[in-house]
Image: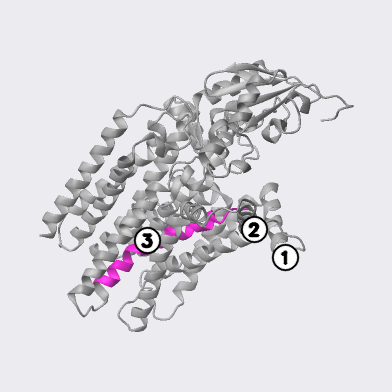
Amino acid sequence: MNAYRGHLLSAVGLGCLLAAVGIVLQTPDPTQYEISIYEGYPGHFWLLLVGAFVLGGLTIVASAAVPEDRTWVFGTALLLLTNALFLLLPLVRGYMLYGHADPMSHIGYVRDIVSSGSVGDNIYPPMHLLVMAVSEATGADLFTIGLAVPLVFAAVYFVGMYYVLVYLFDSRRRVLFGLPFVLLPILGDAHVSLRPYDLSLLFLPVVFYLFFKSQRSPTPSTRIAFVVALVTLLLYHPLTALFLVGIFSLYFVARIVPGIDDRYSTPTNFISLSAVIFLAWYSNFTGIITRFNSAYYTLFGPETGEAPVDTYAATAEEASPPLIDILREAIALYGVAFSVFTLGFLFLAVGSILFVRRRYSPTSYTVMLGATLAVFSFGGLCFLLVDLIVPPSRPFQIAKIGAVVLAGQLFYLLADRVSWPTVGSRTGVRLFFLVAIVVLAGLSVVTFYPSPYGTADNPQVTEMELSGSEWITTHGNTDNQLGGIELSHRRFHHAQNGVDAPLPFSRAVIPARFNYTERPSLGASYSEDAYLTVTRRGRILYPELFPGYRDDWRYTPSDFARLERDRTVDRIYDNGDYNQYRIRGTATAENGN
């Protein structure tokens, strides 16, 4: 019966996926910048994706109840194919690159390596060398490779998570309980972003898998593979390297906990190896030392910076948003994290009770992952409360990996290790699983990409933005300053010319409301000529993201309309998505700026 149910669930899930593919094929690509990728498809498209994720997970769990049943393979394939469609959306919709900020500069670092033939003082050489090598091998441009490389790492992440379960847990049933959770895209846009930290995060499950395997089967080939993967990860990003040293230290502590199953552990020096590599590599870079020094003085010095929570509080006090807006923002930012944390901590609670009652004995690896969840989730709260340079989302991402591996084991314990007095109690466990997978799949889908729902705009880079940026660089007078509305010319210059290439323009400050509230024209705010860039993104940002806060908009539609009538402003370039203006400065020393 369960096997038939599994086939039925997978068939319905496949139908959902095929219907979603049909919608993608019938939907035209955007011709301009779009504020959110969610607005590019109808609402039922996203419901179909959530349905495919949920039905794939249910197929796997239904198969777990039947020994030797293979329908879990169909459920796993359904989850992987749904992930592929979901993560490919920026590429399918014709984005030039996903990310207006760091990814643009990282493309620039690759250009520097190509032009100079060396990495110089680049602290992220593995990612940049990889992008360069793939581009040269395939002949594809760097922007296309910038979209494709994170997708390859996302595939590596999901495969790595599968093997983590296989080598972490002995039974087929435990592995299948874990698969529906680890194959969800819980890391958000880290799955699609060209950033060293995100790529290192996606590679972390591979390091865990090789570590577990090297402990259980310490063959020379396995040990060599583990060391190579470990060194690669340590060189990808300093913060990931530091976090990994901490995780391995937690494993050392887990091994000495009384009563823990430690039969697969073998002597090793990977903790000291990780620490030595970290110190030997990153101590050569002044920027890294400066950041650690800054973090030290934040914690122990007389002065501290503004913590993220203080920024949120100040914004809330200034704008006085309704509670529903605050909750919506919190769900968009931390909904997935706190959902998976809840499941992980419930596992720790249930596992601890069963451990005390001698009905469950966790391995040192499970304890390590549980400690990773606890340390990095509460550590993330510290990053939220104290200005420690990096955002709290980074330790939260590490905690999410630990939590999602343990989430499925919560339901394994509830189903197999807890004696329920009634049939209704077991039904309650099944209902709890259904609610958990629906909530986590739903949040993973609807909060994955930035949207006005979470007051965040789409980091889409359009071809017209690149063309416009290249035009002003080629045709503009470099004696004039250049400013933009919601566009960083520095980032575009990095992507098109390299980070080492000098910036052709100094930055012009564009006043709020174009200073029309104080001056009759924009030119009256400048004593010299300057350039102004206005993109579609800049025009629609405030109305789309903050429709209920018009008084707080930095620029309004009427300001842009007045800009077109301003006699001191000339439009000199327009490709539909990118407008370039020249401001004729009319201010004098007598009337001031």
Label 3 neighbour load within 10 Å: few <14, some 14-19, many 20+? many
Quarter of the image for residue 59 reads bottom left
Looking at the image, which is closer to me, 560 or 533? 560
Identify the coloring. one colour
Residue on which disc 3 sits: 405
Looking at the image, which is closer to me, 290 or 30? 30
Q: Nearer the viewer, mark 3 or mark 2?
A: 2
Q: Is residue 325 left or right of residue 566?
A: left
Q: Is residue 390 left or right of residue 232?
A: right
Q: SS of the residue at dot 2?
A: helix
Residue 166 can be seen, yes or no: no
Q: Is residue 389 in the magenta section?
A: yes
Q: Is residue 22 above or below residue 251?
A: above
Dominant secondary structure, magenta: helix
Residue on which disc 1 sits: 300
Badge 2 amino acid: Asp
Q: SS of the residue at dot 1?
A: helix
Q: Which mark is residue 310?
A: 2
Residue 562, given in percent of the width and then of the height, sits at: 64, 25
Q: Is residue 489 above or below residue 547?
A: above
- Residue at 35% x, 36% y is 41
Extreme bottom residue here?
357
Badge 3 amino acid: Val
